[in-house]
């Protein structure tokens, strides 16, 4: 019995796994499985990357021609009028009547608004009455003076004949001189009262606000019942303007040109303008003047451009893009073969190259460049019109590499 039990215990102990053998064998197999999974995942990523083609942005090389091929500089700015006035009253007063609306065509001198003129009317009536009193006093003094002069003449005759003493003669002469002085004062009072009446009339006229020139009212800045003043009221609710009038015949373009490129701009130079509101409408224009000063903060020079012909669609403060044109190509200068976007040109050492795209593969093309024309470059040789060129993509593009054109 005892021998049998000992034998069974020995058999059971022989079934135990050695801890060292279990650690080395099980752990190694687990790490091998993990490593194999990692290699498989890496291979999947590599094959996926190899199967996916790089995306690039492309454009078509175009044949030279049109204004684009003569563009030497592009800029953007706004439509601005040379004559714009915010019309205000010359006096402080309450608006009685507004006769202007936005979009109304006005003529020079047309009434835009009327202010309350009750005080001015009263002042004018008082000045008018004062002048009437002054004028009425003149005839009486003139009659008295005429009588005094006749009295003096008779006194002189009587004094010669010895019938009047010297004292009576002096009295007649003094009376004549006094009336003459009073008449002069009265006449001057008439002049003074006329001036006061004219001043009162001016104050009355100031209650009527008129257009300073012909144009279009682009804003209505006051309403009946509001107070208006030619100066700010210091935080109150007093308006400082009645309406803004723009001379639509004076519309032009104002752009800021970087001072590094201002040498390419000259008065009279042809310009092609495109309004942001009408991107398909090319408007001929020309440089009117280059303002002879620079903005040191922005390092720009202001250029004013006149439209060759105005159009009702052109409105103040519209955004506009302009292309300054070179004009005729200098004699003896070779014409470019095509035009490509600037970003299509790359540097390969000392060479200039362009990547073409043909049947999904890149072709490195050596190019000979001409002048820059706005956002494009002249290509004298190396690219033909209609050829697809790469304008953007990842770095390290190579000749013969498979790529796909980016959609959109």
Image (cartoon, rainbow, N blue to C red):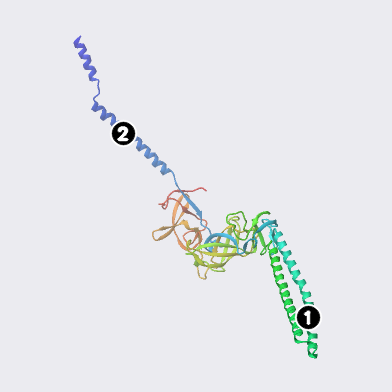
Local crowd size for mark 2, using a 10 Å CA cut-off: few (<14), some (14–19), many (≥20):
few
Q: Which mark is residue 57?
A: none
Indicate the position of residue 140 as horizontal and vertical percent values. 78, 74
In the image, 96: left or right of 338?
right
The local crowd at label 1, few if under 14, some if 14 to 19, many if 20 or more residues have their Cα within 10 Å, is many
Residue drawn at 40 percent across, 41 percent down: 47
The image position of residue 354, as x and y in percent, is 45, 57
Question: Which one is in front in this view, the residue at disc 2 or the one at disc 1?
Answer: 1
Could you tell me if the residues under marks 2 and 1 are in contact, i.e. CB atoms within 8 Å? no
Q: Nearer the viewer, residue 58 or 82?
A: 82
> What's the residue at 27%, 29% (across, down)?
25
Residue 406: image x %, image y %? 49, 48
Element carrying mark 2: helix
Look at the numbered disc 1 and give the secondary structure of its residue: helix
- Dot 2 or dot 1, earlier in sequence: 2
Residue 117 visible in rendering: no
Name the one closer to the observer, 301 or 354. 301
Picture coordinates of residue 319, whole percent (x, y): 57, 57
Is 144 above or below relative to 16?
below
- In the picture, measured across the screen, residue 49 lies left or right of residue 156, that is left
Distance between the alpha carbons at the discs numbered 2 and 1: 146 Å
Is residue 397 left or right of 190 when viewed as pictured?
left
Q: Residue furthest bottom?
A: 161
Residue nearer the viewer, 391 or 156: 156
Could you say which quadrant of the image residue 98 lies in? bottom right
Q: Residue at x 41, y 58 (%)?
A: 347
Residue underneath mark 1: 148
Residue bearing the label numbered 2? 32
Q: Which quadrant is home to the N terminus?
A: top left
């Amino acid at each position: 019995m005892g021998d049998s039990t000992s034998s069974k215990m020995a058999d059971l102990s022989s079934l135990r796994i050695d801890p060292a053998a279990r650690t080395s064998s099980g752990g190694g197999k687990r790490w091998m499985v993990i490593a194999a999974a990692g290699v498989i995942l890496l291979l999947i990523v590599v094959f996926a990357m190899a199967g996916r083609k790089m995306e690039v942005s492309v454009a078509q090389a175009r044949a030279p021609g049109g204004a684009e091929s003569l563009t030497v500089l592009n800029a953007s700015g706004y439509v601005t009028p040379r004559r714009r006035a915010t019309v205000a009253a010359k006096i402080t007063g309450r608006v009685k009547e507004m006769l202007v609306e936005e979009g109304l065509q006005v003529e020079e001198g047309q009434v835009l608004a009327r202010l309350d003129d009750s005080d001015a009317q009263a002042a004018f009536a008082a000045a008018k009455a004062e002048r009437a009193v002054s004028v009425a006093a003149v005839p009486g003094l003139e009659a008295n003076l005429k009588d005094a002069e006749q009295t003096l003449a008779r006194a002189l005759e009587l004094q010669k004949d010895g019938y009047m003493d010297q004292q009576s003669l002096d009295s007649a002469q003094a009376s004549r001189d006094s009336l003459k002085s009073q008449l002069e004062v009265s006449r001057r009072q008439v002049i003074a009262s006329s001036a006061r009446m004219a001043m009162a009339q001016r104050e009355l006229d100031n209650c009527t606000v008129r257009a300073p020139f012909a144009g279009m009212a682009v804003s209505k800045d006051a309403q009946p019942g509001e107070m208006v003043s030619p100066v700010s009221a210091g935080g109150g609710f007093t308006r400082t303007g009645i309406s803004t009038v723009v001379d639509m015949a004076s519309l032009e373009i104002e752009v800021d040109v970087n001072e590094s490129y201002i040498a390419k701009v000259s008065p009279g130079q042809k310009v092609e303008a495109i309004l942001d509101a009408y991107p398909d409408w090319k408007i001929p224009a020309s440089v009117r003047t280059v303002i002879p000063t620079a903005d040191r903060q922005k390092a720009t020079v202001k250029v004013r451009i006149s439209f060759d012909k105005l159009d009702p669609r052109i409105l103040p403060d519209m955004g506009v893009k302009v292309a300054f044109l070179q004009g005729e190509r200098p004699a003896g200068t070779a014409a470019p073969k095509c035009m490509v976007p600037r970003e299509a040109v790359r540097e390969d050492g000392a060479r200039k190259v362009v990547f073409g795209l043909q049947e999904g593969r890149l072709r490195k093309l050596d190019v000979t460049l001409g002048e820059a024309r706005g956002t494009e470059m002249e290509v004298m040789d190396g690219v033909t019109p209609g050829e697809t060129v790469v304008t953007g993509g990842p770095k390290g593009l190579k000749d013969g590499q498979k790529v796909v054109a980016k959609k959109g």
